[in-house]
Image (cartoon, helix red, strand yellow):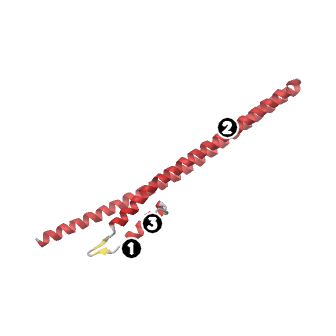
Amino acid sequence: MNDQHIEDIISALYDMIQDARALPLGADKCILERDKVLDMLDEIIAQLPAELKQSRTIVESRNELIGQARREAEGIVRQAQQKAKELVAEEAIYQEARRQCQEMVIKTQGRIADLRKASNDYMDDALRRTQEAIAQSLAEVKDTRAKFRALTEAQENRSTEAAETEN
């Protein structure tokens, strides 16, 4: 069962409940293998940290992308500064070099801003999808657990009523 994803396990739980035999006189109640259902729920709980790890990986890749853009920008700025120093010999050349350097810095800053925005948008979207998947999985687990508890209580109530009827 370790190879299944959370969605597959929840789908299997849903199918198990859907296909379970109905209790006599209780069409909305069914019999399930408790150990099997509990094992599936344990597997879901065990896989949730993997979803969180994936989120962390996305954050790390975003930070690496920003760091790479920053290093690239610093390299471009250094190149521009070096080029400007080489062109200092004549005033006209110096002025042109300075203008080009500033232009490169502005372009680099614009590129950094674009990369930062793109990585932030990507990160926000990935985290949103992960959050939705985790929330949906958690909601499904809670719903299944509530149904399971209700079923268990109903079975216990029937057992108690049957015992009282016999007495």
The residue beneath circle 2 is 70
- Identify the image quadrant of the N terminus: bottom left
* Horizontal and vertical percent position of residue 100: 81, 33
Identify the residue shown where x is 75% and y is 36%.
76
Mark 3 burial class by Cα count in 10 Å: few <14, some 14-19, many 20+: few
Residue furthest to the left = 167
Res 81 → quadrant = top right
- Identify the image quadrant of the C terminus: bottom left
Would you place residue 37 above or below residue 54 in this image? below
* Kind of residue at disc 3: Ser
Mark 1 burial class by Cα count in 10 Å: few <14, some 14-19, many 20+: few
Would you place residue 81 above or below residue 50 in this image? above
Identify the residue shown where x is 62% and y is 45%.
119
* Kind of residue at disc 2: Arg
Mark 2 burial class by Cα count in 10 Å: few <14, some 14-19, many 20+: some
Identify the residue shown where x is 84% and y is 30%.
96
Would you place residue 110 above or below residue 1 in this image? above
* Horizontal and vertical percent position of residue 125: 56, 50
The residue beneath circle 3 is 11
Identify the residue shown where x is 15% and y is 69%.
163
Which comes before the other along the chain, label 1 or label 2?
A: 1
The residue beneath circle 1 is 19
